[in-house]
Image (cartoon, grey):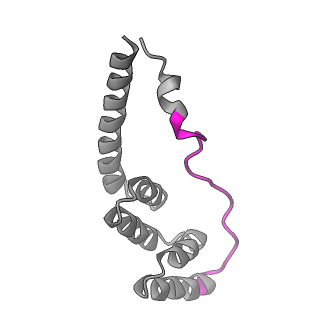
Amino acid sequence: MVKRDTVFQRFGDPGFIKTGERPAIDSAQKAVLNRKGNALFNAGDIEGARRIFLTTGYSDGIARVGDKYQEAGRSLDALKMYWIAPDRTKAEAIIARLSTVIEKMICEEEVNQK
């Protein structure tokens, strides 16, 4: 039997999502920041928009950043955004695909250990 720890060693730090306290901002400030985030997003500055959306907790914007990551083939980054948004439907689709990949890796590791 393969020790599951050996399969996951290649992935480095087990931390997935960093969390912390959101800065205290009032609704007027959030609205201004979200408009700025939307402008950045529409101009193609996805990372700038992401920082603003995460700061304000703008779930629709966070999910749209996840969509862009998914389009770019960045599934883990997309999953992070969907999880934070929270958009469980989109997150679960990625989780299902990743679990299949992990299952195959474990099976391959077991075959290689024999």
Relative to 8, residue 49 above or below: below
Residue 57 is covered by the magenta coloring: no
Residue 110 versus residue 78 in the image, above or below? above
Q: Residue at x 63, y 55 (%)?
A: 19
Q: Which residues are magenta?
A: 10-28
Residue 80 in the image: state x and y as whole percent. Answer: 47, 55
Q: Which one is nearer the viewer's eye here, 8 or 62?
A: 8
Quadrant placement of the C terminus: top left
Which picture quadrant has residue 33?
Answer: bottom right
On screen, 57 above or below 5?
below
Image side of residue 104 versus residue 23, left or right = left
> Residue at coordinates 44% horizontally, 82% vertically from top-left?
41
Asked whether 6 or 58 is in front, the reply is 6
Q: At which x and y percent is residue 52?
A: 57, 76
Residue 88 drawn at (x, y percent): 36, 53
Residue pictured at 35% horizontal, 44% vertical? 95
Residue at 41 percent across and 86 percent down: it is 42
Name the side, left or right, on which 15 lies relative to 93.
right
Query: Magenta stretch: dominant SS?
Result: loop
